[in-house]
Image: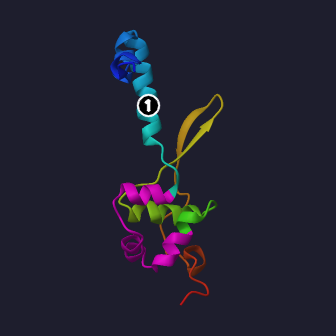
Amino acid sequence: MADPKKLGRTLDEVMATLPAERRERIENAVAEQLREIEGLKALRQIAKLSQAEMADTLGVKQPSVLKIERQTDLYLSTLRRFVEAAGGKLELRVELPGAGQFVLMGVGAAGSMTEAEAGLRGQP
């Protein structure tokens, strides 16, 4: 049987053979991808909050947090409250061709989450 140490190289060994500029581009791309998360459940988990803790902060019941996390189409005000309950701040960035990036202000302003937004209708 072949020695496993001779069968391949580690990622660190491969990266060490690359030019510094290419290593930096790869490391920056990896760091950017690690900053991207998939959905509100992941955001809540990064904030180290349970659904019950998030519900308490939002003033809703735990099943409502589950429903919000599963939704793919949210009111911006609901998203803003969820992000703020996790300890974050929501910024809406818009990029227009030839005009650059802008932060859109006054959209989804913080306010009271309605029962419809929280998914409380019909729940005990």
Q: Is residue 72 magenta?
A: no
Q: Secondary structure at mark 1?
A: helix
Q: Is residue 59 magenta?
A: yes
Label 1, residues with CA under 10 Å away: few <14, some 14-19, many ≥20:
few
Residue under the image location 40 percent in, 70 percent down: 54
Number of callouts? 1
| Residue 119 x/y as whole percent | 58, 77
Residue under the image location 42 percent in, 75 percent down: 55
- The three-letter amino acid code for the residue at tag 1 is Val
Foreground of the two, 87 or 21: 21
The residue indicated by pointer 1 is 30
Residue under the image location 41 percent in, 55 percent down: 89
| Residue 63 x/y as whole percent | 51, 77
Instruction: Return the residue found at the far front.
Output: 1
| Residue 24 x/y as whole percent | 39, 19
Quadrant of the snapshot with the N terminus: top left
Name the quadrant containing residue 14: top left
| Residue 121 x/y as whole percent | 60, 84
**Where 15 sits versus 80, above or below?**
above
Name the quadrant containing residue 94: top right
**Where 16 sits versus 92, above or below?**
above
Residue bounds of the magenta highlight: 40-67
Foreground of the two, 91 or 6: 6
Q: Is residue 93 left or right of residue 3?
A: right
**Where 104 sits versus 45, above or below?**
above
Instruction: Return the residue found at the far bottom.
Output: 124
Chief secondary structure of the magenta portion: helix
**Where 116 sits versus 74, above or below?**
below
Residue under the image location 48 percent in, 60 percent down: 41
Q: Is residue 30 left or right of residue 72?
A: left
